[in-house]
Image (tube, rainbow, N blue to C red):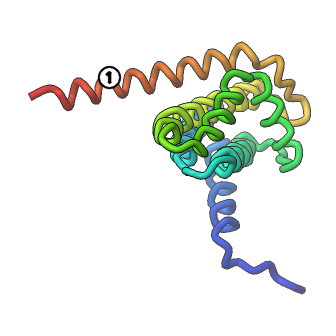
Amino acid sequence: MAQKPSGSMSSDTEAMASSSASATSSVPEQRDQAAAKLVDRFAIWSGVAGLVPVPVVDVIAVGGLQLQMLRRLSQIYNVEFSENRGKALIAALAGCMIPATSGMGAASALKAIPIVNILAAGFVMPVLSAGATYAIGKAFVQHFESGGTLLDFNPPDYREFVKAQKEMWESRTRGRSASSTTATSSP
């Protein structure tokens, strides 16, 4: 009987996620907290991926992070995950957020223009990437909490919810930057 190589980092990570998912899925409150932390963490990592200075590579990196987030959320909520279905749903949900996603593409393209690329790479793209990932994650959390699966997810149903979550993320980041500005300017 052939064994699967166990040296890969991603399989170890997935095994830990599976075991933590089964442990957290037993208590809904713990499961919801784990999902919220996961979405926050992936939103931050998407913001970091938005800092990648190469156009298009940053968008691909953010998309990969969003797909991984969806895979991990599926594990937490014990929902069967299909990579192709996940990609299609993320793309469809992102399509519902046309201003945010077109802004990500435009910000990514601006990285090719000298001088302007500093603004796009340092400010615009990270915020758009993090906000979109946060909104997508929260939409899937709400869907999975209501007993939904990847097969019955309908992106247009979540259009208003995604907009509200994106605005919530933006207000959180504005609040953090205002408090850090106040903290640094205080004696």
> Residue 15: in sight, yes or no?
yes
Image point (41%, 22%), residue name: 174
Image point (86%, 24%), residue name: 154
Image point (62%, 15%), residue name: 164
> Residue 72: in sight, yes or no?
no
Q: Which amino acid, mark 1?
A: Ala
Q: Residue furthest front?
A: 114
Horizontal relation, residue 177 to residue 144: left or right: left
Image point (58%, 30%), residue name: 131
Residue 110 vs 142, above or below: the answer is below
Image location of residue 146, percent across then percent down? 76, 24
Of 3 and 174, which appears nearest the observer? 174
Image location of residue 19, percent across then percent down? 65, 57
- Mark 1 is surrounded, within 10 Å at the Cα level, by few (under 14), some (14 to 19) or many (20 or more) other residues, namely few
On-image quarter of the N terminus: bottom right
On-image quarter of the C terminus: top left
Image location of residue 67, percent across then percent down? 73, 46
Q: Which residue is mark 1?
A: 178
